[in-house]
Image: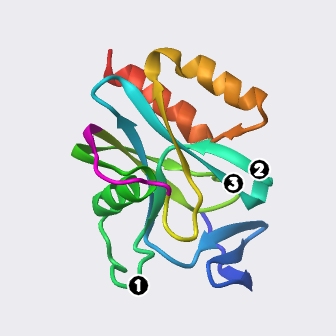
Amino acid sequence: MGAQPTDRTIAHTPYLRLISRGDWSFVQRTTGIGVVAIVAMTDDDCLILVEQYRPPVAGPVIELPAGIAGDLADYPLEELQSAARRELLEETGYEAAHLRELVTLASSAGLTDECVTLFFAEKLEKVGPGGGDESEDITVHTIPIASIDEWLTGAVRRGVLVDSRVYGALYLLQKERG
């Protein structure tokens, strides 16, 4: 096996860097130390999802609550679990009594070196409004798991994209429940 190709920066913004490695180009984040997404289940068997406009796809997207660990100036070395708790509260208004790491996934391995760590949150308590921070406009959806397929199909029919992690979360929930 030969030597690893050297990375070369092609472009750089405050948040992203375009890297060339051998014959491949890909994107890296310049802030944060990891990405988290939360599979949040209420005691009455509902999955908490968020919806927000995403400029790269020029439209709304249904997603798991998620965010970047270590992107706050006061907490550059924030632990992933702390970031998951913070993002769940910020985006949905829920706190979780139990939060457990499930798996780390490649976000889009042909486009970025970013990986996302999924957490399972349960024993939720609504303690705030959610909706994101001042730069976000997030709608919170609490969907009964028994009707999630129908609900997601309806969202797609109304022109909303569904982030692939939502479908991954449904698979993991099915495994969790046997």
- The residue singled out by tag 1 in the image is 73
Q: Residue at x 27, y 37 (%)?
A: 122
Cα distance in 3D space between marks 3 and 1: 25 Å
**Residue 68 can be seen in this image:** yes
Quick one: 10 or 117, which is closer to the camera?
117
**Residue bearing the label numbered 3:** 53
Taking the view exactly as shown, the residue that stands out farthest to the front is: 129
Where does the magenta region start and end?
122-131
- Mark pair 3, 2: CA separation: 5 Å
The disc placed on residue 149 is none
On the rendered structure, is 7 left or right of 72? Answer: right
Residue at 72 percent across and 75 percent down: it is: 18
Up/down of 23 relative to 91, above or below:
below
Query: Gap between marks 1 and 2, in whole Å?
Result: 29 Å
Quick one: quadrant of the N terminus?
A: bottom right
The residue located at (48%, 60%) in the rendering is: 67
Is residue 54 part of the magenta span, yes or no?
Answer: no
Q: Is residue 139 left or right of residue 108?
A: left
Q: Nearer the viewer, mark 3 or mark 1?
A: 3
State the residue position of label 2.
Answer: 59
Q: Earlier in the sequence, mark 3 or mark 1?
A: 3
What's the image's color scheme?
rainbow
Crowding at dot 2, Cα within 10 Å, few <14 / some 14-19 / many 20+, comes out as: few
Amino acid bearing label 1: Ala
Q: Secondary structure at mark 3?
A: strand
Q: Of tags 1 and 2, which is closer to the observer?
A: 2
Crowding at dot 3, Cα within 10 Å, few <14 / some 14-19 / many 20+, comes out as: some
